[in-house]
Amino acid sequence: MRSVSDAFRQALYAQESDEVAVCLITVTHPELADPIRLSTDPTTRLSTDPLLYGTRSRGDDYSFVPINVMIPEEGEEAPAAALEIDNTDLGLITVIRSVTQAASVKIEIVLASDPDTVEIEYPAMTVSHVDYDAQTIRFSLAIDSLATEPFPGTAYIPSMFPSLF
């Protein structure tokens, strides 16, 4: 069970609400000088030249881009997520083509009225697959699940641990 604020819970359960849940996406990679920060909502104007809208959260600017976020379901054995981003800027395609290792993606959910309070945070996910065309960039994300790791890591057998027997 997640612990979220009462304001967030009321906004989600209300039939109508002025509150907007905003997904903040942070893409990091060793080959990137700065993380790529994206928002699902044009909460505020970030700059006038060029005209840029997005969300300012905890001192960082997240640029608004139309994004469809499929978040992992609670209790999945091998959690997975997906992002579909409108291909409005060729800069992201250039970055995708230039990297040689998988990037890391973090998804956080905030309210537009209180963007500095993270209501839900998903652990960093690894980009497992990228597909794109002229309109859309699709990222498949996977969380390394410790639930699929064998426990214990080794077998306690006489040949490996003779002093136990």
Image: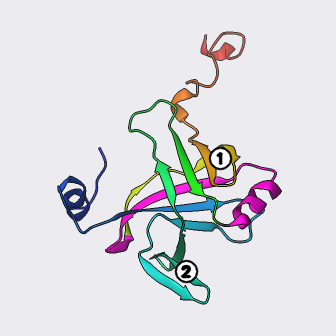
Where residue 109 appears, as percent x and y from the top left, is 40, 60
Q: Distance between the residues labelled 1 and 2?
A: 26 Å
Where residue 163 appears, as percent x and y from the top left, is 65, 16
Q: How crowded is mark 2: few (under 14 residues within 10 Å), some or many (20 or more)?
A: some
Whether residue 106 is in magenta: the answer is yes
Q: How many labels does the image show?
A: 2
Residue 14 appears in which quarter of the rendering? bottom left
Q: Is residue 137 left or right of residue 96?
A: left
Residue at image point 28% right, 53% down: 3
Q: In this view, does 39 lie to the left or right of 10?
A: right
Residue 30 appears in which quarter of the rendering? bottom right
Return the mark for residue 127.
Answer: 1
Q: Report the span colored magenta.
A: 89-116
Q: How crowded is mark 1: few (under 14 residues within 10 Å), some or many (20 or more)?
A: many
Residue at image point 54% right, 34% down: 146
| Quarter of the rendering occupied by the C terminus | top right
Q: Is residue 19 left or right of residue 48?
A: left
| Quarter of the rendering occupied by the N terminus | top left
In the orientation shown, which residue stands out farthest toward the bottom?
49
Q: Kindly identify the amino acid type of the residue bearing the numbered disc 2.
A: Leu
Callout 1: helix, strand or loop?
A: strand
Callout 2: helix, strand or loop?
A: strand
Q: Which mark sits nearer the N-terminus, 1 or 2?
A: 2
Q: Kindly identify the amino acid type of the residue bearing the numbered disc 1.
A: Val
Where residue 117 appears, as percent x and y from the top left, is 36, 69
Residue 92 appears in which quarter of the rendering? bottom right
Report the mark closest to the observer, 1 or 2: 2
Compared to 117, does 129 lie above or below? above
Whether residue 32 is in magenta: the answer is no
Q: Name the residue under label 2.
A: 52
